[in-house]
Amino acid sequence: SGTLYVVATPIGNLEDITYRAVRILEEVSLVAAEDTRHSRKLLNHYGINTPLISYHEHNEESRSTQLLVKLKAGESVALISDAGTPCIADPGYRLVSRCRMEGVVVAAVPGPSAVITALSISGLPTDAFRFVGFLPTKTHGRCQFLEQIKAEPQTIVCYEAPHRLIVCLADMATICGVDRPIAVARELTKRHEELFSGTIGEAQNYFSQNPVKGEIVLLLGAAPERPPEGTVIDALTRLRQESDLS
Ligand code: SAM
């Protein structure tokens, strides 16, 4: 059977595509894309004429069935999304999963993803992080969610719409405290790329004076480490013992 290639495309700067991605997009018989008009422009930029077919969250199920027929008949297909890596806060995993179940080879053609790009320039610890996709859009749901993650001992990365940044920061301030470190990455790889880093309180100040435009990634610093229960007492006891000895 053919191969399903999961191909990453730029998140802004059109130079951020690999040689291999361009070659695969040229060689496959079909490119499955979220928005075919948007992707036609992208492919035109690289001089690629491969036919496009739509694949988005509303037709994932039926399209997967059609694409599987083609793959099993020996045709290779590339899956792309509007920007970045398919399946990361984007449609695709259902097709990948069905290919795997039915023995069709799935190959990764890696490239940019906003989550990793933002993390790499955030200055926040990157040894461990948790990506939570898009935050709930309503205050009640968002606050409930923030309650669940506020004690995470690792950097939290999320996608958020720019017009919700101020209300989102207000909820974060209430639940995580104004002193928690935060970074806001905006328009990554584009002309107006910007990275704000500071505390939640500072971010509230800054963004209320400089309303954010464009696409953003929010990165919340890990919860401050609390000494395990009993630690202070243990230290005191040890000090006393030491002074008793002297
Ligand atoms: N699959 C994509 C990826 O690999 O990053 C993410 C798709 S998701 C539908 C789109 C969200 O990613 C945007 O709302 C924004 O939060 C984030 N994003 C994408 N491109 C970005 C950029 N250039 N700068 C900042 N955030 C970006």
Image: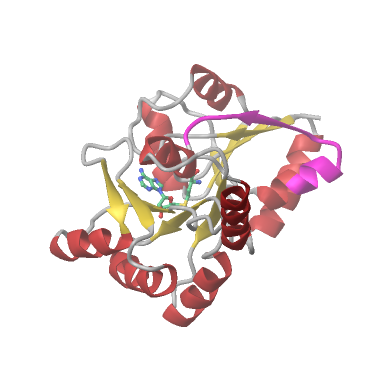
Can residue 228 be spotted in the picture?
Answer: no
Q: Which residue, as the protein is rendered here, is positioned at the far right?
A: 102
- On screen, residue 229 above or below 96: below
Along the line of sight, the residue nearer the viewer: 238 or 106: 238
Relative to 210, 161 lies left or right: right
Q: Between residues 135 and 61, which one lies in front from this camera angle? A: 135
Quick check: 245 above or below 204?
Answer: above
Quadrant, the C terminus: top right
Q: Viewed as shown, does residue 100 lie left or right of 116?
A: right
The image quarter in which residue 122 lies: top left
Q: Quadrant of the N terminus?
A: top right
Residue at horizontal 50 percent and vertical 69 percent from the top: 146
Residue stretch rendered in magenta on the structure: 97-112
User: Is residue 65 something that shows in the picture?
Assistant: yes
Residue depicted at 64% across the width and 63% down the height: 230
Front residue of 154/232: it is 232
Q: Establish if 186 lies above or below 136.
A: above
* Image quarter of residue 127: top right
> Is 41 part of what is drawn in magenta?
no
Q: Position of residue 86 (x, y in %)?
A: 56, 43
Please indicate whether residue 116 sits to the left or right of residue 230 in the image.
Answer: left
Residue shown at the point (29%, 52%) measured from the top left: 198
Q: Specify whether 180 is left or right of 76.
A: left
Residue 89 higher or lower than 135, as above or below: above
Q: Residue at x 53, y 24 (%)?
A: 21
Is residue 101 one of those drawn in magenta? Answer: yes
Instruction: Give residue 77's position: percent from left, percent from top.
Output: 65, 34
Tell me where residue 172 appears, x and y as whole percent: 39, 68
